[in-house]
Structure formats: C-alpha cells, structure tokens
Amino acid sequence: MSALIEIKDLVTNFYTYEGVVKALNKISLEVESGLTFGLVGESGCGKSVLVRSIMRIVQSPGVIEGGEVKFHMKKNGKDEVIELLSLSEEEMRQIRGSEISMIFQEPNAALNPILSIGYQVSESFLFHISEQMCAKVLEDLESPRDNTNFIWKSFLRYAYRVGSKDAKALPLRIFNKIPILKCWDKRLKEEATRRSIEIIDKLHVPHPEQVVKSYPHNLSGGMKQRIVIAIALACNPELLIADEATSNLDVTVQAQILELLNELKKEYISSIMLITHDLGVVAETCERVGVMYAGNLCEVADVREIFKNPKHPYTKALLNSVPRFSTEGRLAVIDGFVPNLVNPPSGCRFHPRCPLTMEQCKQNVPDLKETGDRHLVACYAVD
Amino acid sequence: MAVFISRRLIFLVFVMFGVSFIIFGLQMTFSPERRAMVFVTTPQQAKDIPVLIKKYGFDQPFYKQYFTWLKEVTSGHLGYSLVASDSVWRAFWRYFPITLELNIFSSPCIILFGIWLGTKAGQKANTFTDHFTRIFSIVGWSLPTFLFSLVMLMIFYGYFRLFPPSVLGDELTLLVYGNTGEFVRYTGMFTVDGILNGRLDVTFEALKHLVMPVLTQMVVICAILMRVMRSGMLEEMGKDYVITARAKGVDKKTTILKHARRNALIPVITVAGQLVAALMEGSIAVEIIFNRKGLGWWLAESAMQLDMPVLMSLCLFIAIVFVLANLTVDIIYAYVDPRIRLS
Amino acid sequence: MLENHPRLKELRYTLFRIFRNPSAIIGVILLLFFISVAVFAPYIAPPKYPNRPYMMPRAGYTITPKPPDEKNIFGTTEGQYDIFYGVVWGTRTAFRVGLSVIISAVIIGVFLGTVAGYFGGKVDEIIMRCVDVVFAIPFLVLAMAIVVSLGRGLDVIIIAIAAVAWRTYPRVIRSAILSVREQDFVQAAKSMGVSDFRIMIRHIIPNSIYPVMVIAFMEAGSVVLTAAFMSFLGLGAPKGYADWGQMVALARNYIVGPPDDPLKFWYCIIVPGGAIVLFVLAWSLIGDALRDAFDPKIRRK
C-alpha cells in the first residue's frame, strides 16, 4: 500500500506564560492511503495539535518549529509529493478543503451562527472549483432554453469564459468592485448552492432545499455534524481528518455518524484519519491505529494487532482501563498523572508511570521500531 | 414585534416620568423667591415677587406643582426659554438643525473609521497596527474634548488660517438670517439649504466650518468604538468557525470580513447606537468652543442658568432619542443575527 | 502553604500580565510622578500666602500673559497668575476631585448593585429602573444642573459628579453577581447557613469586583476631565484657585495670538492642558492594562 502522508520529526510548541509547552516532540508517522487510521490517546496528549499542524492551522501562541510533512497527491493520475510545511500560504489554502479536509469536535461551534448553511457549504465549492463551476454555468448559458436578455447574456458569457480559465482573473476582480456588474457571480453562487443541496442530500439530511436556507441554530446536533461533514467532503478530498468528530454527540447519533463515515469512505474519500479517545470507536471503524502519549507516538499497528497484542506499556494500560462487561472488580487505572508538557519527564515521557522502567528510559527517548507484522513500538522494554 | 415595540414604549413613558421627576426635584431646592426672580426684569417689578409666587404657585407643595407642570406639558405647552428668549418649541427647531447637521457628517465618519481601524487592529494581537490603534484609542479617551477643540482652533484657525469656528462667516450669516427673502431656511441646515437656494457658496462655507468639529468628534469618539471592535475581532479570530473556514480553504480576506467581522460587529452595533444617540443631545464642549449654537450649547447654557422649561423638555427629548436608538439597534440586531427573534 | 494559595497565585499571575504590558508601566510611572508632585507641592512651589496655598500667586496686575522667564518658568497666564505654581498645586486639586468622586461613586454603585443582584425580585427591579432613569439624563447636563442648584464651587462639583457617576457600577456589579450567585461555592456557603451579609462580603464581592476596578480606573480620568470642563465653564472654584480646568479657561482668550505671531501664547494653554491630558492618560493606561489582564477571554491564551 502506498503512503499518503509521511510525517517526520514534527515539532510544535506553544509559547505561554507558564513556559514553552512542547506539544509535539519530534513525531514521525506514516499514514497509508485507502485506510482509516485511528489516533488515540488521553485528552491533551497532542492529537489535535498533530492534525492541525498537518493542516497548518495551529493557532497562536502555537508555532510549528520543525520537521516535514510529505503529502502524496494524485494529480491527473500521477503521484506527486508535496512538502506541506514549505508551501506558501496561498498554495496551502488550495490544499485545505480540497485535498485534506477536517471535521471538528464541536458541531455547534464549528458552524458560523450568522451565516446560512447554504452559504457555508457553498464556500467550499467557491474557493476550490470555481473554474469548473464557471464552465458549467457557461454551458447552461449557451443552451437555447436560457432566456436572459441579450446584452446581459453576452456580458455573462464573457465573464464566465474568463472565469472558467481563472476565477481570480483581473476583469472579474474589477467587476466585483462595480455595483451592477458585480452581480455576475449570481449564477455561480446558484450553481454552488445547487451542488451544496446535492452533497447535503447525499448525507441523508432530509429536505436539503430547506436546510440550505436555514441557520445553524435551526438544526439539531447530529444534523449540524452532517453539515460539517458535507463541508469537508464537498471537494472530494484525499484525506478526511475527523477530530473527535463524534465525542460530543449522543450515543445513537454517534453511531449514525460513524456509519455514515464508513459508507462515505467506500464511495468518496480514499482515507480517513480518526482522532478519538474512545477505544470502542477505534475498534469498530479503524484499520490501523496510532497511540499517542504526551506529545509522542508510542505505538502504531493494525487494529487487530493492537487489541490482541499490545506491546507498549502505555497501550496495555490504556486497554486495561476500558470497562468491560465480562470482568468484575475494580477498573484498572494508570498510576500517576499526565505529565506537564512545560517540563516533560526526561527520556521516555511515560517512564514515571511505567511498570517496566529501566535506567535508559530515564535518559534516552526511544525511537519507533518495527517489531514485525507492521507493528511499530517506541519502548526499550520491547525487543 | 408589536408586543416588543409596545413594551419599549411603555418603558419610555416610565423613563420620561422618572427624568422629569428628578429635574423637577432639582428646582425645588430653590426658594420660591429665587424662582420668582426669574420673571423679574426691572427693579420696579421686584416688589411684585409675592404676586408672582402666588401666580405661578411656587409656594405650593411639590406634587401639586409637578401635576400643574405635567398638565401643561401634556397639553402641549413646553414653556418659555429665557436663554433663547423664545418659546421652547420654536427655539428647539432653531437649535436642533445645527446639531443634526454636525451629526449627519460626523456619525458616518466615526462609525466607518472606528470599525475599519478596529478590524485592522483586531486581526492579530501585538502587531504594529494593533499597538498603534491601542495607543490612539487610549489617547483619544484621555483627550478632553474642550481642550482638544481649543488646540485644533489654535493650530488650524490661528496658525494656518483655515477652518474658522462658528456656523458661517459674518457676511453670509447676515444673508442667511436676514429677512430679505433672498435665502429661505428650509431645513435650518445650511449645507442643505445652500443647495436648495442655489447658493453653493453658502454650502461650501458651511462645510468649511464643519471640518474642525467633525474632526474633533471623530478623534475623541472613534476611540471607544474602535476599542470594542478590536476586542470583538480578537475574540472572533479564535473561534472554532473561523478555524473551520480556514480549514475548508477560504482565503484570509473572506475569513476576516465574512466570518469574523460580521460576528464582531454585533456588540459594536449597540455601542454605535448609543454613541449616535449621545451625539444627538449635542456635544456640549464642541458646540461651546466652536461657537455653534446647537442643542448642546443650549443645554449647557440652560443648565447654568437653570432654565427649567428647557432642561425638562430637552431631557425628555433625549430620553425619547435614547429609547428610539435602542429600538433601532434591536431591529438591526435581529437583521444581522438570525438567532434573535424580537419578542 | 501560603505561597501556593490559589488567590495569591492568581494575583501574582495578574501582576505579571499587567506589567508585561508596556502601557501599564508608562501609566504607573506617570501616576507616581503626579503623586510625588502632589505630595511635595509645598517644596516644589513654596506658597506665597502660607494660609491659602491653593491660591495662585500673581506676578503683577496687567492682563496679557507673559512668556516663560527665570521667575515664572512656565510663564504667566491671563491676570499674571503663575502657571508653574498653578500646575503643581492643581495636581492636588485633580487628585482630590478624582479620588473622592470615584471612591464615593464606587461605594454607592457597588452597594446598590450588590443589593439588587443578590436579593433580586422587587428590590432588583426598583434599583435597576432608577439606574435606567439616571442613565437617560445626559451626564454633564445633570451634573451641571446639580452644581447650579447647590451653588457653585469645587466641593459642589465633586458632589454633583459623584451623584451622577455612581450609575455605571450597579449594572456592572449586578451582572457579575448574577453569574457568581449561581455558582457552586456560593450555593454551598448558603446551604451551610452562612448569613447573607457574610456571603456577600466574603464570596460575591471579591469575585465580581474586577470589572468594577477596571471601570473605576478608566472613569477616574474622565471624572477629572468632566470636573475640568465644569471649572472651564466657570462653575468651579473661585478665580485664582489652582485648578487646571480654570487655567485653561483663563487661556481661552489667548488661543489665537496677534496676526504676526499666531502661536504667541501657546504656553498658557499647552502647559495646563498637557497636565490634564497626562493625568488622565495615566489612569486610562492603567485601566486599559487592567482590562486586558482581567479579561477572561484573552487571559488564558
């Protein structure tokens, strides 16, 4: 299987009052294309920071300080490798939403309360496939059924011909500043709305024509999350990142959304990266799993392997702390506290809580090593 | 909607009662003799004081006087202004256009400039623009309007000989207020009347006299608006939906203008509404120092001479303006923010 | 143990935030400067008439101002009043006005706001409607009318401004209290039978006082401005009293000099005017830094 994203030595720090929070400590990770990759770990271990660093939307005071993120993009059937961290902001903007897109944790906060759903979904189209849509509108204009008056029609024809080559061409930017002429994009927006209705419909949202006219506060949590997914899927991205996409939903809605993601995966998206702290979700939906602890990646393996044969002591502890019906007695907990990332423990960051601590764990940081059967572990005790 | 508006109007009546009560109470601190003195113009009339007290009922208890006054006002008699030496009603229409004209020019400048600068400053904390606008807003807040107006006069009028104070130059004042029928005062605002009378020189002259007061108000009042806008923008830029917008590849300009600014504008609307309403009562310092006899000048003059009919009527007028401004703000709110339904 | 008391820790963090802000440092330096001028006024500008130190000495009886020289280092204003002396002793006047107004306004406002917010119901309704009414009258007009009806003078100005300035605080403290009141620790104290008064003093006021402090600092400056403007209009102290507003008023006829030298009398407006601006600026800068430091929205980033 070919790699989709290769992350190498990624470092992201947050400069706060308490000191520098070392949120990502030289993370290296490879995500293959065509898989659902699960990223698990406690809250605050850096999962979200990792994916936001990939998309370069880390908020201040966070700074991506080093490493590289290689993204394998399929363009016209050819495989092209792009280093995301060295792109310009404009190039990165074009990748966001069209190649890699993201679903956020809190559907209530992820939608702008004062903009209509239709507008928010169609923005995805307007900022990525304007040219394509201009061509479509041009086609409609040429059709004999169109009965716009002649002068306006020839103006529109000119505008869309320019637009279908470059949506940011100079004439169009000039039109945008002139009162009546700036209505040229009305049909473009209609086309975008039409596509929005289409994509919302595909996500099993009832009455999509009315939904696009409504506002976020009119919709339920599950519906909102579907809209957020629609926004992310609009341009058929290569990779969909779901950052705790189901954590804040009811259990039933959660199941529906996961089902939906599974379904979509088959049809539209090549890969999904699922971030969660819920191991049940991982077991159900993922094919490969990465376990994170305090800004480090400790273990990466296929999902069956992780559950059957966990090797890193933290993974083991994590699996033990999941409540089960079959066992009785006290729930196992991991001793100690999540470390403070301003002054993280030396060496392996898990060593103060680890039952297998050795002398070298306190000094050196273990690397991820292949231990057979596509199973990577970062631990000195595993050999 | 109807319920909403009627509730506001009931509130207005309540406020007007309270306001008139307070101001009426203030004049009760004077002895009946002193209040009767107001009507005395010649030494001979001084012996009529007891008669005057009886005539106007100054010796009656508070509530009786209040009700007498209330009856007068509700039947449309606002009283006589000593400061203007005219009836309050007529004098109002003489002074109000002067204030209104200044506000028509200054409020759009204040609002647009304040929002523009606040947006620039709030995009990212601790940039140069941010620091600059912060300093500008703090200094603006700390500038006494009267002092700033004086310094403006000193520099622009005294040194550069530009932009004179008052409403019009002497010659044109004679023309405008003369009774020759050459110039009809349709609105009382000379920039408009100049156009209506086909005397563009009057309009031009009036505009020239407006420059300094408008500038002064802009510098002093913009600061407040900008401050609100800035903190709103800073807050919005960290919101999840702004990150969502970035994550779907929306460009920076649209993210700021459409996603962040529209939300940040919501609290700004309230502040802007209050500021414009406050401008309507006339900026006292600006009107006194630039010698523009508008509502602010009239209010200050009346307060200093305790010209009660004027104080009462104008305070009631201001209460109405404030309630109307709040109502307008609420309606704009409902338009900008789909979550709000007036009820 | 005391080292790590949460309130102390929070205070230390707040102080750190305040003093990381350069504007606060400038504000504090300015304020310290004005405080020392006020305290050492008798040594900086020894009074000519020891029993009436606030009256500005006159260097003659001609009217036209005189430019700075060795005797009057900032020159003299209309009526030959010494500007330097007036500015130095005017600092004391400014502090007296600013502090007494703000302290009394805060006490009245916080008291009413606390009562309204804590008891709610009818009490709340009555108090807040009164606040609405006072808010509906323009600040300056009401204050001026009060001054005129009580008789002019500096003390009357203080009373009048305080009588209007309290209106800002009840709303602020009330909304803060409403959010604090529902919190668990207040409910807990209540269920343990702690008296209303103690709950207010111990729990509610300390937790809702920050916004009041910020506004008080910002307002302290604007109160001095209002007082100066009222003195400027001639409602304040008798002529010759060391008061910045009055000194600006004395300069009013001299803002435009003779045609050949239009800025001839700059000193008689710029010096006292500059003193007012810097004084107000000191308070506003500190208030601004406090606002940033206390703002929970940007605090924890």
Image (cartoon, rainbow, N blue to C red):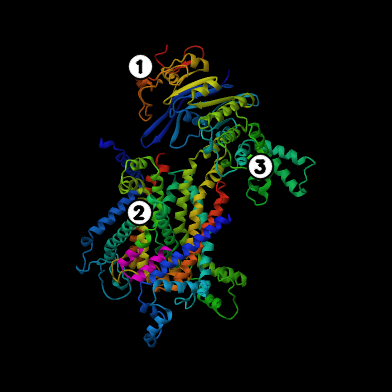
Q: Is residue C48 above or below residue B243?
A: below
Query: Can you say whether B177 is above or below C163 in the image?
Result: below
Q: Mark 3: which amino acid?
A: Lys
Q: Position of residue A234 (x, y in %)?
A: 62, 33
Element type where label 2 sits in the image = helix
- The picture places residue A192, in percent across and down from the top left corner, at 66, 39
Q: Is residue B135 left or right of residue A203?
A: left
Compare marks 1 and 3 and give the one earlier in the sequence.
Answer: 3
Q: Quadrant of the C terminus of chain A?
A: top left
Disc 1 marks a residue whose amino acid type is Thr
Task: Give the image location of residue A102, x and y in percent.
Answer: 55, 32
Label 1 crowd (10 A; few <14 / some 14-19 / many >=20): some
Q: Secondary structure at mark 3?
A: helix
Q: In this view, which residue lies farthest toward the right?
A: A144
Rendered position, B148 above or below A249: below
User: What's under tag 2, amino acid-wise?
Assistant: Val
